[in-house]
Amino acid sequence: MSVGELETRNRSISDVYGALRAKILDLQLPPDGKINIDALAREFGVSQTPIREALSQLEGDNLIVKTPGKGYRTTPLLGTAELRELFEFRLLVEPWAARESAVNRLSNPGRTLQSSLDDFEDGSRADDDVRHRLVTHDTQFHDHILTASNNAFALHAFRATHCHLHLFRLHPADYRGTQTVEEHRSIVTAIQACDPDAAEAAMHQHLIGAYHRFNEAFAQDGGSDLRLPPPATLR
């Protein structure tokens, strides 16, 4: 295979991966639903090979599961118990990471975080696809903070949850990210000021707020109330 053919093949897989990922996140491929590889290959005008390779990548994102003898399925949505466990984990790791990041050193991610925030807000004014922009911004924002904590184990554990991809499918009440951006701004301000106490508190409040927004989404969909204590009482 020539270099040009290899590049074309890799672009094809990347394009299929991106398109399938968008379909899963937008629920066009329903949660816990069987994947029809033949139908997808016809839809995208490709062979089964890039479909299978893209599905393999999506397995790594925990958006697809492969069962021997049964093929591929999309993963189910998080339930109330899983959502609570995810946020309890994040509340253990991310406020600490924000505190560790709020230091007067070159590793301070304040400028990078501000740039990410500015890019999202600038793009949102000109782009109707806010939800996809929001999941990209949110993923990068929290990843930058975990990276700046200089703890490879914490970063790996955080990335292994693929939390933003799973949460994105739940359609939170803050659909356009307005509240999320305000909370991110508070975190950035504290980190740029090298104020570890404020950074830790801002991240804590952000995660509690996000949890309750998903709780509201569950309630609107007729799901169970997640019953996490209000932000003022959870310490």
Image (cartoon, rainbow, N blue to C red):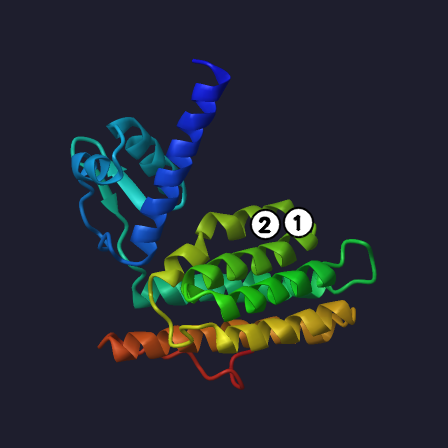
Residue occupying the point 73% across, 61% down? 111
Picture mark count:
2
From the viewer's perspective, is 123 left or right of 54?
Answer: right
Image location (x, y in percent) of residue 37: 20, 36
Q: Is 231 on the left or on the right of 27, as rendered? A: right
**Horizontal arrangement in the rendering, residue 117 relative to residue 168 (left or right):** right
Quarter that holds the C terminus: bottom right
Residue type at tag 2: Leu
Answer few, some or many: residues within 10 Å of disc 2's Cα (few below 14, many 20 plus, some between 14 and 19): many
Identify which residue is drawn at 40% across, 73% down: 175
- Residue, disc 1: 151
The residue wearing badge 2 is: 155
| In this rendering, position of residue 130 left or right of residue 219 | right
Q: Position of residue 73 (x, y in %)?
A: 23, 44
At a point 39% along the width and 62% down the height, the residue shown is 167
Q: Secondary structure at mark 1?
A: loop
Hey, which quadrant is residue 188 in on the image? bottom right
Which residue is farthest front? 126
Residue 200's label in the rendered image is none
The reply to whether residue 63 is visible in this rendering is no
Q: Are marks 2 and 1 in contact (CB under 8 Å)?
A: yes
Disc 1 packing (10 Å; few <14; some 14–19; many ≥20): few
Q: 6 or 74: which is nearer to us? A: 6
**Residue drawn at (31%, 58%), measured in percent from left and top?**
26
When the figure is inspected, residue 206 is found, relative to residue 8, above or below; the finding is below
Q: Residue furthest top?
A: 1
Asked whether 40 or 61 is in front, the reply is 40
Identify residue type, mark 1: Asn
From this view, report whether residue 148 is shown above or below residue 94: above
